[in-house]
Amino acid sequence: MAAAGLSDELAGLLPRIQRLARRRLWSELSGPRLRGAHAELLRLVAAEPGIRVSAAAHDLCLAANSVSTLVNHLVAEGLLRREKDPGDGRAALLYPTPAGAGRLRDWHTRREALFREHLAGLGADDRAALDAALPALRRFADSLREADSLREGDETT
């Protein structure tokens, strides 16, 4: 496939897979929906308890004020806990609450089951092709992140 066709296909297909998976998972959840960015932030905080809002914003490629808004929602839902950084009273450290950790475990379990189910429905060749594509997709994501970081550096100078 030509680069232009591949770029169009990737740009449309990856978000569609995410939306379809979220829609299916949301329909099975009780309580308020975990929207994509909320789930991403909760995953990050669970993986790095005590992360600062600014570091979370950088990792998620979002503006700090956007992450602050997400944090406010997750705190109000009882899924995140925010504490002042003892080393810098202006900064906040983020921690998952037990409810947040449980919600995230449930989300992961359901998402894994959904993907396993649909991967099992594919032929062995398709599963092997998807497996073989993962390193290239990671490099592609890293390339986008690097380009974004370089652009951010240019904007601050």
Image (spheres, helix red, strand yellow):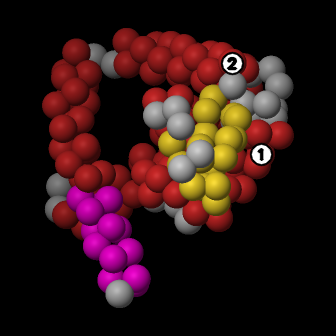
Direction from residue 88 to residue 155 in the image, left or right: left
Direction from residue 100 to residue 75 in the image, left or right: right
Can residue 35 be spotted in the picture? Answer: no
Quarter of the picture containing the C terminus is: bottom left
The residue that label 2 is drawn on is 98
Q: Is residue 52 above or below residue 118?
A: below
Q: Amino acid at mark 1?
A: His
Q: Amino acid at mark 2?
A: Pro
Query: Does 11 appear in magenta?
Result: no
List the single residue furthest toward the front. Answer: 87
Q: Which residues are magenta?
A: 143-156
Q: Is residue 152 above or below residue 139?
A: below
SS class of the residue under badge 2?
Answer: helix
Quarter of the picture containing the N terminus is: bottom left
The residue that label 1 is drawn on is 73
Residue 47, position as x, y percentages in the image: 46, 30
Tell me which residue sits at (62%, 21%) in the image.
101
Residue 119 placement: quadrant: top left
Residue 114, position as x, y percentages in the image: 52, 18
Direction from residue 42 to residue 56 in the image, left or right: left
Query: Does 144 appear in magenta?
Result: yes
Tell me which residue sits at (74%, 26%) in the image.
27
Residue 123, position as x, y percentages in the image: 27, 17
- 93 and 116: which one is in front? 93
Direction from residue 38 to residue 154 in the image, left or right: left
SS class of the residue under badge 1?
Answer: helix
Earlier-in-chain disc, 1 versus 2: 1
